[in-house]
DNA sequence: CTGAAAGCGCTTACAG
DNA sequence: CTGAAAGCGCTTACAG
C-alpha cells in the first residue's frame, strides 16, 4: 500500500508535486510529471479517496436514490447512470429505500447530507419542501428523474400527455370500452407518476366523450403478476368487459396480455393492450407502447449532474432538464380495432 | 454543517468524548453521553464519513461488482444485498463493469484496492490468481457469488447438478430429443456458469444414454429476446425438432416458451421447457424451474462479509459459504410427457 | 471516565 | 514550477 510519500521519495520530489502531477491541478514541469507518473506506476500507487476527499472537499462519488431495483424502469435507469459515470471516473453509491419510509428518512438525514457524495440523483422520490431547502443549504447538486420537483433540475417525461396519447390511440381505433391500469396508492407515493398518467387517461376519455367506468380504473403494484390478477378479474367478468386496456407500465401490460391469453382471449382481436415504457420484452410480445428510454434518462441525469459539478463542457448539447425527455410511440401488434358486437 | 467541535462545545465536553459517545467505542458516562446525543440531535450533526474513515481505517462501505444490472439474476442479487446492508448501516458502492474488460480492470486496480471500501462482493466475476493475491495482501475481505474462486469465500449453487437435475426431469418424463440452451462464449467469461450447466446437461444425457445432438446445443446472451431467436430457429426446423429444452436461465426459458407459442406449438404438449432461476414471471408463464433465490444469495454474501468484518455475531446461523446455496425444484406446467410420434 | 494531542493521507494557498 | 506547512474532521492510544 504505497502512499504519496513513497511516490514523492522515489520520484525525488515533494508530496505537493506528486499531488499536482497526478491530479492535474496546478503547474508541474513535464519532466517532474513524467517521473512522478513512472514512480506511481511502479509502486502501484492509487490515491486514497478518503484523504483526498477530506482535503479537497470533492469525493468523485455520487449517490443514486431509488425505491427499488427490482423493477425494469429502475434497474435500467441504474444501468444507464453507471455507464455514464464510469467513463467520468466517478463512483456510484446506491441507496435503495425499498419503499420504506424509515429507510427513506435515514437516507435523507444521514446519507445525503454529510456523506462522501458530491451530488445526488433521485429517482421518483418525493421531496418535502424542507428537504429541498436542506439540500440547497448544503450546496450539493441534485438532479431528479421522474415527476416534478420544484427548484430541482428534473429529467422527466410528459406523463400526462403520454397517457393521453396512449388512450387516444385506442379511441382512434374505435374503442369505447377502455380500462386504465395504474399504480396502487401505496406505489404512487414513491413512483409518483400514477396519478399524472391516470389524469391523462381521463382527460383523453373526456375529450372524446367516452364514458369512464370507475370499476375499470384498476390499480396494481407495477408488477406483471399483480397486473395479471387485476386484469384477469376484469376480463373474466360475465358481463361487459373492456376491449382496450391502457397500462401505466409495460411490465403491467405484459400481465394484461398474459391474463387475456390465459382466458382464451386473442390480443388484439378480442382485447387491445397498450403500455408505457419501452421494455425489451415488448418486442417479443408485440406490445404497442410509448418508449421512454430509462437508460437514457439515467445517463442524462448524470450528464446534468456532472455539468453542475463543473465537470463537463456546459456547451455539450442541449440542457436535458430544459423540457420533457423525449418519448416514442411504438406501434406493434397488441392494439387493433375492437371486436364487433 | 455542524462539526464535531460544535457538538463538543454545546455539550460542554471534548471532541474525544463526543466521538466516543456517538460511536460507542470507549467509555463515556451516561450523563455525558446524553448531553452529547442531545447536542448532536439539535445541531443535526452527522459524522463526516471521510474523516472518520481516514482516521479509523474503516469506512462502513462495501463494494459490489457486477457485469450488468440489466439481467434479473444480478438486479435481484443487488436488491438482496442492499436490503441486508441498509439495516447494518453500511453503504453500497456499485461497480458495473458492463462486461467490458477495460472497466473490469479499472475496477480492480483503482477502485478496490485503495478506495473507501471495507470489503467487496463480486458477482460471477472471474479473478486471476494475482488479483486474488492482491486482494489478500490488502487485507480486505472478499465474498464471491457464483462460480468458484479458490481461496475466497463463495456463495454458489451447484450448477452442475442443477442442470443435471433439470435434464433428468425431462428424461424422466420420456424425452429423448432434448436441446440445451446455454450462454454464449462471450457471456460465459463473466457469468462463468454456462459451462458448468452444460456439463451437467451432458452428464445427465450420458448417464441415461440419450444421444446428444450437437446442433441442439444452443447458446444465447441470457436475454429473452436472444433465446427466442435461437429456439425459434431450432423449433421451426422442418425435420426433427427437440421435444424438450433445458435452459440455463429463466429469462431464456421465457424466450423459448414464446418462440414455441409463436410457432403454434403447445407447451408442454408439443415441447417442454425447463429453466433455472426462479424468476417471478415464471409463475405466470407456468415455467418449471429450479429456483436459486438470488436475493437470498446477495443477503448471504452480505452476512458473510459482515462477519468477516467482525460486525455480526459469528454464531448467527450456519456459514453460508460452507456448502452450496440451496435450490428448489419447482414443477409447473411447462414440462410434460413428449408428444407421441 | 475524560481531555490534549498526534495522526490518518491527502490538497492547496502561500511564499519563493 | 516547487516545497514547507497548515488544515480537512475525525479517532484513538496515552496519560491522567
Image: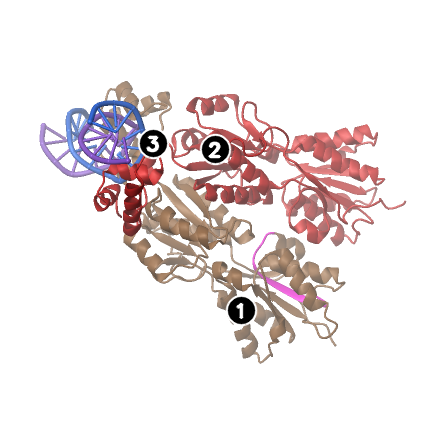
Chain colours: A brown, B red, C purple, D blue
> On the image, numbered disc 2 is attached to which residue?
B120
Residue B316: x and y in percent read 54, 34
Residue A225: x and y in percent read 64, 56
Q: Chain of mark 2?
A: B
Queried whether the magenta region covers residue A274, the answer comes back as yes
The answer to which of B247 and A66 lies nearer the viewer is A66
The answer to which of A20 and B143 lies nearer the viewer is B143
> On the image, numbered disc 1 is attached to which residue?
A198
Check if mark 3's residue and mark 2's residue have beta carbons within 8 Å: no
Quick one: label 2, few (<14), some, or many (20+) residues within 10 Å?
A: many
The residue at 83%/49% (across/down) is B269
Image-based side of B262 in relation to A17, left or right? right
> On the image, numbered disc 3 is attached to which residue?
B56
Residue C16: x and y in percent read 9, 28
Quadrant placement of the N terminus of chain A: top left
Count of marks overlaid on the render:
3
Q: Tell me the magenta residue range.
A: A268-280
Quick one: label 1, few (<14), some, or many (20+) residues within 10 Å?
A: many
**Mark toward the start of the polypeptide (3 vs 2):** 3
Spatial CA distance of label 3 from label 2 is 19 Å
Amino acid at each position: 500500500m504505497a502512499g504519496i510519500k513513497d511516490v514523492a521519495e522515489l520520484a525525488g520530489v515533494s508530496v505537493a508535486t506528486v499531488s499536482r502531477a497526478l491530479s492535474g491541478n496546478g503547474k508541474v514541469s513535464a519532466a517532474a510529471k513524467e517521473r512522478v507518473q513512472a514512480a506511481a506506476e511502479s509502486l502501484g500507487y492509487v490515491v486514497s479517496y478518503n484523504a483526498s476527499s477530506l482535503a479537497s472537499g470533492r469525493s468523485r462519488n455520487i449517490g443514486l436514490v431509488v425505491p427499488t431495483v427490482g423493477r425494469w424502469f429502475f434497474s435500467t435507469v441504474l444501468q444507464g447512470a453507471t455507464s455514464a459515470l464510469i467513463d467520468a471516473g466517478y463512483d456510484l453509491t446506491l441507496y435503495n429505500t425499498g419503499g420504506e419510509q424509515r429507510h427513506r428518512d435515514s437516507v435523507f438525514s444521514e446519507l445525503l447530507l454529510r456523506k462522501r457524495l458530491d451530488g445526488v440523483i433521485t429517482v421518483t422520490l418525493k421531496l418535502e419542501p424542507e428537504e429541498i431547502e436542506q439540500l440547497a443549504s448544503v450546496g450539493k447538486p441534485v438532479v431528479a428523474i421522474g415527476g416534478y420537483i420544484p427548484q430541482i433540475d428534473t429529467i422527466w417525461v410528459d406523463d400526462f400527455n403520454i397517457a393521453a396519447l396512449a388512450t387516444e390511440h385506442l379511441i382512434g381505433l374505435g374503442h369505447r370500452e377502455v380500462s386504465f391500469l395504474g399504480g396502487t396508492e401505496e406505489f404512487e407515493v414513491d413512483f409518483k407518476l400514477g396519478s399524472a398518467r391516470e389524469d391523462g387517461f381521463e382527460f383523453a376519455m373526456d375529450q372524446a366523450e367516452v364514458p369512464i367506468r370507475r370499476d375499470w380504473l384498476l390499480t396494481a403494484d407495477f408488477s406483471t403478476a399483480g397486473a395479471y390478477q387485476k386484469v384477469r378479474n376484469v376480463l373474466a367478468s360475465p358481463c361487459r368487459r373492456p376491449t382496450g386496456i391502457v397500462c401505466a407500465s409495460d411490465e403491467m401490460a405484459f400481465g394484461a396480455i398474459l391474463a387475456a391469453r390465459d382466458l382464451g382471449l386473442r390480443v388484439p382481436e378480442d382485447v387491445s393492450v397498450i403500455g408505457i415504457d419501452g421494455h425489451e420484452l415488448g418486442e417479443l410480445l408485440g406490445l404497442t407502447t410509448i418508449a421512454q428510454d430509462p437508460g437514457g434518462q439515467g445517463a442524462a441525469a448524470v450528464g446534468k449532474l456532472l455539468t453542475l459539478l463543473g465537470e463537463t463542457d456546459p456547451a455539450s448539447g442541449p440542457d436535458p432538464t430544459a423540457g420533457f425527455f423525449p418519448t416514442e410511440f411504438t406501434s406493434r401488434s397488441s392494439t387493433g380495432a375492437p371486436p364487433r358486437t
